Amino acid sequence: MPELPEVETVVRGLNKHLVGHTIKSFDFDWPKTIKTPPEIFQKEIIGSKAISAERRGKLIIINLVPKDSESQAPHSLLIHLKMTGQLVYKSSKTQYGAGHPNDSLISKLPDKTTRIHFKLNDNSELFFNDVRKFGWVELVPTEDRHLHKFIASLGPEPLEIRFKDFKQALFKHPNGQVKAKLLDQHIIAGVGNIYADESLWSAKIHPQTKISDISELKLKSLFEELQKVLILSIKQGGSSSANYIKVDGKTGSYLTFAKVYKKEGQPCEHCTTEIIRTVAAGRGTRLCPSCQKLKP
């Protein structure tokens, strides 16, 4: 699943290329992908112009104004990629996207994974692909979007909060394991497996450490390292995979600089102990057994 930096990267690309264009038509092959009733979706989306794109956690939000502003209210298109979703923008000059790393990101589209295909007034296209069909798209009134159940459930943005807010959010669950709570979108929005592992390694905290057992100094280090790794990844265009495409058509490069993610068997840059792979919070987890010891 794409995490905060990947979603932020594609949102910045949408603001660069999609904004100002009108949705001319759309088609779909899996009705359950669209959570809005089809007749309402059809009525509101056709002729609407994209005026901005933004991110909330791992959610992509495209803000639209209607073709008839006197009788129709502005709407926002909410897009969640879930585990295997992709959002791909394609024009005669560029193609980029983010999501599950399979060939649909770079292949000829639409293909068998394409669930929704938007055609724009300048002949560019936007594709929502999803192999396992868990992702979703929903159209909501812009002025009420903050009331949407999913958005309202999200915790604070990790790059927009102060340390005391970060601490307060985690300490609502003092007996919880720190990695599990970092991944909980109700506590902190947008953090996923890669960035949890990287920040915990940098702060020298074992992923299964109880939050109440983390010192103030260590917790502040975790907060700072999490922000650093997210900012670095955004700067580098998100986590890299063979098929991840940025706005300029190049692959993201963050994982070139990863310290533990997919580095099992390699020496820790802190102490040269071999990085191992284990399971924490139900997810594959990389750590240094020497630097990140779990207290009994």
Image (cartoon, rainbow, N blue to C red):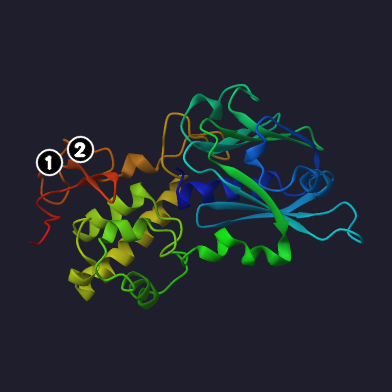
The residue carrying mark 1 is 274
Give above or below for 154 relative to 288.
below
Residue 44: image x %, image y %?
81, 50
Of the two numbered discs 1 and 2 on the same chain, state the one appearing first in sequence: 2
Residue 106 appears left or right of 200: right
Amino acid found under the numbered disc labelled 1: Glu
User: Which image quarter: residue 168?
Assistant: bottom left
Say what secondary structure mark 1 lies in.
loop
Q: Which mark is residue 118?
A: none
Is the Cβ of the residue at disc 1 closer than 8 Å to that at disc 2? yes
Q: Nearer the viewer, residue 98 or 27?
A: 27
Residue 152 appears left or right of 66: left
User: Which image quarter: residue 283?
Assistant: top left
The residue carrying mark 2 is 264
Residue 215: image x %, image y %?
19, 73
Residue 249: image x %, image y %?
56, 33
Say what secondary structure mark 2 lies in.
loop
Give above or below for 49 relative to 118.
below
Crowding at mark 1 (Cα within 10 Å: few <14, some 14-19, many 20+): some
